[in-house]
Amino acid sequence: MTRKVLLTGDRPTGQLHLGHYVGSLKNRLALQESGEYDCYLLIADVQALTDNFSDPQKVRDNVLQVALDYLACGLDPVRTTIAIQSLVPALAELTIYYLNLVSLARLERNPTVKSEIAEKQFGGGVPAGFVCYPVSQAADITFCKANVVPVGVDQLPMIEQTREIVRSFNATYGDVLVEPEALIPSDRQSQRLPGIDGLQSKMSKSLGNAIYLADDEKTLRAKIRQMYTDPEHLRVADPGHVEGNVVFFYLDVFGSDAAAIAEMKEHYQRGGLGDVKVKDYLFELLNTELEPIRQRRAEYARDPGAVYQILREGTEKANEAAAQTMAEVRAAMRIDYFG
Ligand code: TRP
């Protein structure tokens, strides 16, 4: 029996934040620890370039930042192969073949791409590479025949599109590729962590409402102090609202002492519990969880050369896996001319 394969990835466009952490990184870590999978992590610089093509330095810098975030969280290069997308040329090759198996109309219907296009407002028209990035993501997922793809809910349309491409490839050329399954966090509240500014928008770098894994203690405290609570809760003695209150939302996601949190909610609603008290409680909780991550990150950051070496070795391993799949793909597609 061969082991199941797990693959996921991130665009290196910024440091990873708490939304990534609860929505995906924690899940990956647990899956790595389970020992059930061959794990791959792809730093998707090619995909990042589809909407940052004019800012290559930003993408380059963030490859290192994302690698640091992975290592800081405890993703372990011995058990998880960490690779750089652009240095696995088979991904570009697969993308070209897969492009024949999907219609432009289907790509334009992809809900994630659609909302991203609306959000980004590309000045000179939408780059073809951007519309097609789900196809390149299908290449990412299939080059190592991944069975499972742990992602956030926003990525479900990508996995669906990949499954369609796999079915089409296998029906057209023969059974070579594996149809992957998405793995999303079971806790609904973790699936979409709101930013510190209110429940209406999710945490994101572009909205400036994120808490980063790399934030130091002082920054973390300041951001929690800024968190949106209940605008009508003016005096400590006033009764306050727990619904719509970011601090309580975070306590539900990150807290482990359910009884203490339930009691705080009750006290807050009754009146007599100040925002600062609840925020300080949340700070302690988050800081305890983030402190070891922060420390590990700082250690790795001291030696970027060693981090690049980890990426180099991971990329080599990914290329070996890709070579195997490509041999089968080429044979199935009748383009294995020289055997
Ligand atoms: N599109 C993903 C995101 O924006 C990143 C990504 C690239 C990815 N390739 C992948 C995720 C392969 C899962 C599998 O977060």
Image: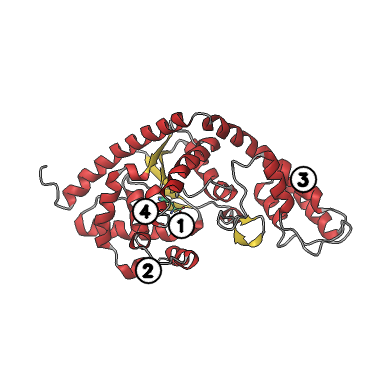
Q: Which residue is under mark 4?
A: 137
Residue 76 marker: none
Q: Tell me the distance, in whole angstroms, between the alpha carbons under discs 2 and 3.
A: 46 Å
Of mark 3 and mark 4, the one earlier in the sequence is: 4
Question: As displayed, is residue 317 above or below residue 325?
Answer: above
What residue do we see at 80% from left, 53% from top?
275
Q: Position of residue 6 (x, y in %)?
A: 41, 44
Asked whether mark 4 lies closer than 8 Å to ligand 1, one says: yes
Horizontal arrangement in the rendering, residue 227 relative to residue 300 (left or right): right
Q: Which residue is under mark 3?
A: 280
Of mark 2 and mark 4, the one earlier in the sequence is: 2
Residue 155 marker: 1
What residue do we see at 39% from left, 67% from top?
124
Q: Mark 3 touching mark 1, by CB under 8 A?
A: no
What residue do we see at 81% from left, 48% from top?
277
Of mark 1 and mark 2, the one earlier in the sequence is: 2
Asked whether mark 1 lies closer than 8 Å to ligand 1, one says: yes
Q: Tell me the distance, in whole angstroms, between the alpha carbons under discs 2 and 4.
A: 15 Å
Q: Mark 1 touching mark 4, by CB under 8 A?
A: no
Q: Mark 2 touching mark 3, by CB under 8 A?
A: no
Three-letter amino acid code at disc 4? Gln
Of mark 1 and mark 4, the one earlier in the sequence is: 4
Q: Tell me the distance, in whole angstroms, between the alpha carbons under discs 1 and 4.
A: 10 Å
Q: Position of residue 25 (x, y in %)?
A: 52, 44
Q: Tell me the distance, in whole angstroms, between the alpha carbons under discs 1 and 2.
A: 15 Å
Q: Nearer the viewer, residue 206 or 255?
A: 206
Q: Which residue is under mark 2?
A: 108
Q: Residues within 10 Å of mark 4 (few under 14, many from 20)?
A: many
